[in-house]
Image (cartoon, helix red, strand yellow):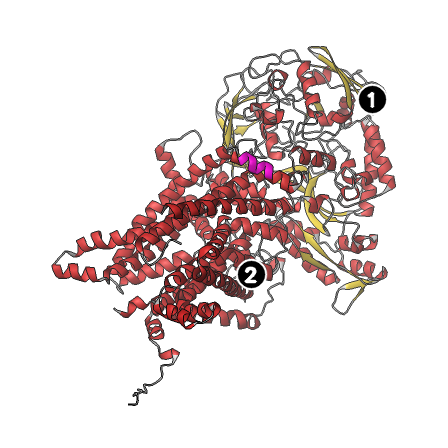
Amino acid sequence: MSAFLLNRLIQSIVLLVIVSIIGFTVLNLMPGGPLAQFGLDPGMTQKDVERLATQLGLNRPLWIQYLDWAWRLMQGDWGHSFRDGSSVLAVIGRHLLATLLLMGTSTALAIAAGTWIGIRGATHRYSLFDYCATVGAMVALSVPTFWFGLIGIYIFTLKLGWVPAGNMYTIGDGSVLDYLHHLILPSLVLSLVHVAIWSRYMRTATLDALSQDFVKTARAKGVSERRILLKHVIGNALLPMITLAGMQLPSILTGALVTETVFTWPGMGRLFLDSLGYSDYPVVMGLLIFSAILVVLGNLIADIVIATVDPRIRLA
Amino acid sequence: MTKHSATTSNYSRRDALRMVAIGGAVGIFAPNLLGKPAFARASTKPSGRVIVGLGQEPTVFNPLMAHIEVDDGVHFSVFDALFRIDPQGVIQPNLAVEVPNQKNGGISEDGLKWRIRLRDDVRWHDGKPFSAEDVKFTLELIMNPNFRSWRTAGHALVRDITVVSPTEISWRMEEAFAPYLSFLTETFIVPKHILEKEANPNNAAFNQAPVGTGAFKWEKRVPGDHLELVANTEYFGDGPHIERLVFKYIPDLTVLYTQFKSGDIDLVGQPYITPDHYGEAKTLPNRVVTLLPRTSFESFYLNLERPQFKELAIREALYAAIDKEAIIQGLYYGVPTPTETFMPRQSFFFNANLPLHKFDLNRAAKILDQAGWAKGADGIRAKNGVRLSFANSTTSGDPLREQLQQFLQQTFAQLGVEMKISNLPAAVMWGEFWMQSQFDSVIVGSSYLIGADPDVTNRLHSRSIGAKGGRGSNNAQYANPEVDALLDKGARTFDPEARRAIYARVQELVRRDLPFLPLYQSNSVEGLKKGINGFVPNGNTRTESWNALAWYWAS
Amino acid sequence: MTAIVAHAAPIRWWNSRAVNRFMRHHLALLGIAMITLLVVACAIGPYALPYDSLQIDLRARFAPPLTGQHYFGTDPLGRDLAVRLLMAGRVSLAVGFSAMLLSTLIGTLIGVTAGYRGGWVGAALMRTVDGFLSYPSIFLVLALAATLRPSPVMITVIIAVTSWMETARIVEAEVRSLREREFVQAARMVGLSRAHIMFREILPNAMGPIIVAASLAVARAILLEAYISFLGYGIQPPLPSWGNMLNGAQQYLASAPWLAIIPGAAITIAVTSFNFIGDGLRDALDVRNDHI
């Protein structure tokens, strides 16, 4: 096991290095750059732009810029944003909290609802409920999130006035109730897709578990259906669920991107889009490294769980 | 307060004389400009809060560092400059006691020596007194080669800055440069006692929590969301009257408008309300929605080094093939105003006598036929192996511009001209693609003026061609020696009447040569809640929040 | 003694158990029906309607559905929405399908190789997959869209390049578990070449998950194309795609909601159909269902 972990660690570091090199190159080779925002300024001359480029260190050869960045990163300095000068870690941290709030709530909703729907669908297979749940899940997976969010705002904010038009909280009011009020619609919209995924998954897992021999045995022994469900089915479905969750981990970054844009939620997805739009290289590189770390972690969790469950697969 | 008429200019003879400043007395008190009318209210404690919604996030709070328009709103509120420019284009004193010119001796006859007297009752937000040392420090910081300063034009010509006394400063210019007065209206003064201690002013803590002399003090910022300013009760001017000023960032334009409708924001800032919402916005209860002229204009911008655009006949034909009326009324709901020039119509220097555009496809076809561009087998005109086919680019994700492009594409196709649409993300579009003239043609909306100064050397002078090693943003690569000479002369002339004649001729020549096809002058659809008084639009600044100190809620 | 060879009726593929199970999956059949309908409509429809998808008519802007001969109304430039929807369908469906083919090809190749070879080759390949997954898709999309000029071919490549990782993961896991089965060991003992074993023995047995993943890939590709075009980096105007039709519609949600509802509904129908088909395939090809 420890050999495996060590192996993985080495592989992950290599991965991080390669990801950062390629990302850095792609970023810098992309036409445009952090100074394009001054392209239309009537008072900025070509000379001013070149001066700014030199001051930002953008005129040095690419490999020197990369090594400079990598060296600082190894010492714990993730760099400073080109736009407002604040430290990249602080920027990512703030936006991460907002995203976790949104995704945490919607995932909790999704797991709760999805589990119930999935299990009910499996135990009442081919019933009307099951049919509706299946079709509903399919449609939910197919609806473009940005479209759904806009329609949600149109109905619930403009027409009914039940919920605010966006943002995380009302300026001047920061109470928990206010936060919850702002959280309702975005988390519901975001959870739509996740409910579908989890319900489909739980249905399959439950069907799987129910067809196992030990369930037939338990039934023969007279154990109540409810206990079978709770103990065996959910217990067995839990591990693969963790695998699924592990594989979804990297989506923290941009999974909520569309919802964050439509609902003006200051999360990671929006941060990524904004920094990419302004070519804020330090922040984008920071986000890439963060994303790569998430991928590595997610994979690790998933692989360990799968290997624990399926003895045929050697952790090679 | 003031209304913008649709006619050429509201710059009267009296105003012109005022700018020459017959007596110092006229300029000293900056009447009613920066504060509200004296009869309106007795001075009471500032109260209330105004939330301004912005489509881009302000991120640069040191006004000397490179920044974009949305940052201006914060700078105008937290800082002061030596002078301000009022909606009529008249320069008013702010931190200075009077506006220097050649009549009152503030500027020497040859335009080289400047002497400015400053107010003595100004304090920084941290209580320390303001003095000429701060002005000297500011001007020197801008030229510090390690400092990421914004514009250095004009400041680069300043030499021998001398602090004569805490309220008087003087310097010498390398050459006479009339636009410098306008530049100084956008140069905010920063505190020497705070910034001189910083080893690296680029990373100063000051940049995250600025200290200025302005009507509002910095309170806090929630990055990615909003920032809050509070009233400076010790401000030397007449105001502020609101206790709290909040700038809120809403990236999606539709959501910006939605929040305006629902009342989550009190005032719509840049980029204002889109023209297609104008019709509905006008009818909203408890909202005041007006059209305000800006200095920017939209044009079909050409790269004159492309073989398709070299001949004047082609440019004239393309211009005649644009149905401006249909575009403005149909696509833009009548919001913008057609224009023939880069000069905004509210400017003193606007030339009202330029030939008017007329949409005439037949005439366009005739011009091209006569110039020898005959339709080929594929329906596209060609001459000497060059097909009249080109690409047109603009920022992607802008639906109104895309509609404009498609409309033009169809009209040009009737003429036998092929236009391909190739849009790019903003960070790509305005980078080298724009600055190094790598495009064929572009639809661009921009302002050519700095402050209200008519000097457009940066955009139209032949030495401003970036692609040829020049130092400006003449990306059309326009080169006309007569225009060059006029621009050089205009920058050295201080007399407004003389400058007016010079720039009128420049506009005539540019209209004749058509390096770009002018479409319309932008009018922004400004919206605010009924009850906010004191809001005055100023087309000569880049922000709607230039005089937030005059705003107050009607009780 | 001669061996008795029983001659049973040969089982053609359309009689196989999998296909039978598929046929019993009503939703999947519905999905196939809807997709066929869509494809036929997009192929033939534009010829049956009286308008051209590119004809701008500023006097007929924003006509609601069922105005005159505009069955679905008109868009902000006065172009007939029905024709544009069907022309856009051609682009979106073609891009979706081609992207799926390309991404499935790449993913399968890499997955099979990684799964079978294992060791450091497998690890390197899977870390490459991880590498690609590290980049948020929006980053890859924006970077590629900025460097390459967007055209339907380029969009297909971009989508394929950002979607093959899922398939590779699934295939690799499947191949890894198949690798230890007896038939593979037998093939190795017989001395069949590695390539033969990978592609002629293992791959056909792994087809189940691949097919399922492929049908879901089309669904995802269509959604991704819609998203990219919605952001403005995809299919350029005036060529219509369902995504860029939505892009122009979001600000008119209150005044002309059909502009957003109709393309959105088309996307939803197409994607749902592919999801149904994928679901049906998954049920049909899942051998565990043989017990029930």
- Which quarter of the rendered picture does the N terminus of chain C lie within? bottom left
State which chain disc 1 sits on.
Answer: B
| Residue at mark 1 shares a chain with residue at mark 2 | no
Query: Which label was assigned to residue B111?
Result: 1
Q: Which residue is mark 2?
A: C156
Local crowd size for mark 1, using a 10 Å CA cut-off: few (<14), some (14–19), many (≥20)? many
Is label 2 in a helix, a strand or a loop? helix
At 74% from the left edge and 67% from the top edge, which residue is drawn? Answer: B379
Residue B178, quarter of picture: top right
**A71 part of magenta stretch:** yes
Q: Residue furthest top?
A: B165
Q: Nearer the viewer, residue B419 or C286?
A: C286
Q: What residue type is disc 1 on? A: Gly
The residue under the point 50% across, 22% down is: B243
The chain ID associated with circle 2 is C
The one of A245 and A100 positioned closer to us in this rendering: A245
Is B244 above or below relative to B132? below
Q: Is residue B341 magenta?
A: no
Magenta segment range?
A67-73
* Majority secondary structure in the magenta region: helix
The answer to which quarter of the image holds residue C215 is bottom left
* Residue at (70, 21) in percent of width and height: B140
List x then y, in percent, for residue B37: 60, 21
The CA distance from mark 1 to mark 2 is 62 Å
Residue B474 visible in this rendered orientation of the protein: yes
Q: Quadrant of the C terminus of chain C?
A: bottom left
Residue B334 shows in this picture:
no
Does C186 sit left or right of A284 as displayed?
left
